[in-house]
Amino acid sequence: MSDINHLFSMAGKRVLVTGASSGLGRHFARTLARAGARIAVGARRTDRLQTLVEEIRSDGGEAIALALDVSSRKSVIACLDALNDQFGGLDVVVNNAGVSDTKAALDYTDDDWDNILQTNLKGAWMVAQEGARRMVKNGGGSIINVTSILSSRVTAGVGPYCAAKAGLAHLTRSLALELARYGVRVNSLAPGYVMTEINRELLESDVGEKLKKRIPARKFCEVQDLDGALLLLASNAGRAMTGSEIVVDNGHACSGL
């Protein structure tokens, strides 16, 4: 029974969460800290990171804030080196940093494309690659790439984002294949529409009501709905899982809409 009770424990695990200054990343960091992990939160907006760190510490957790621009390999390496200096190693990466935009396909510029792909795909690649190099030396670990239901379906206005998330989903499987022999698991977590501080106003508007009608459950996900899947992929509960994608979307991907 004791093994079952501790199956999802993150006690002592050293975790990096990227894009942690708001939204899903912020929630992921707090969830993993409550499960016992030692958390490094990374983002460009370090002022907001410090507030998050103080909240985690006030809850009895351990956390540090690290400046991180995932579009720069130099920044990624510096962040991971600082994490290693503080924690002595890395066990889990939650590759969450991402950006998006909404425009008609014919209105996107090359700069728009480069910005979205640089952050959502190349940035995730660099964090996963540099994180995996450290995990291989430490005997293993878990990388969780946050994709989207748009990694396997499309909607209008977000072409570059769809392309980036589809690429990240396929990259997840490729990395899983190569890194399994080193004890490094690579999986993806694919949310549907999730209520966060960034999009709550939109999702609670008339536009949001129309979106909601496309979802079989007729409701959006809340951030806490992702906790079970996150902990499964991060903890020993998912130790035999690699190359998998877990979809959390209230059935949206099944609807075909």
Image (tube, rainbow, N blue to C red):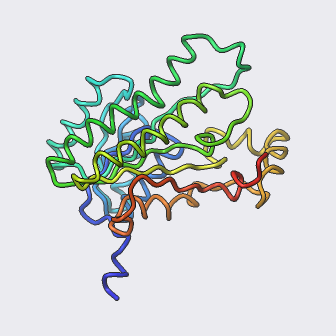
Q: Where is residue 13 in the image (x, y as percent from the top left)?
A: 26, 59
Q: Is residue 82 left or right of residue 41?
A: left
Residue 51 percent across, percent down from the top left: 41, 43
Residue furthest bottom as drawn: 1
- Residue at 47% x, 37% y is 168
* Residue lying at the far top of the rendered structure: 110
Residue 36, picture quadrant: bottom left
Give the residue drawn at x 37%, y 27%: 69
- The image shows a total of numbered marks equal to 0
Instruction: Decide if residue 226 is on the left or right side of residue 124.
Output: right
108 with respect to 143 (left or right): right
At which x and y percent is residue 165? 54, 36
Q: In which quarter of the image is the N terminus?
A: bottom left
Q: Position of residue 6 (x, y in %)?
A: 33, 76
Relative to 130, say whether 182 is above or below: below
Residue displayed at 84% across by 44% down? 210
Residue nearest the observer in this picture, 27 or 105: 105
> Which quarter of the figure has residue 3?
bottom left
In depth, the one of 51 and 200 nearer the eye is 200
Foreground of the two, 43 or 118: 118
The quarter of the rendered structure image containing the C terminus is top right
Q: Nearer the viewer, residue 232 or 88?
A: 232
x 81%, y 41%: residue = 205
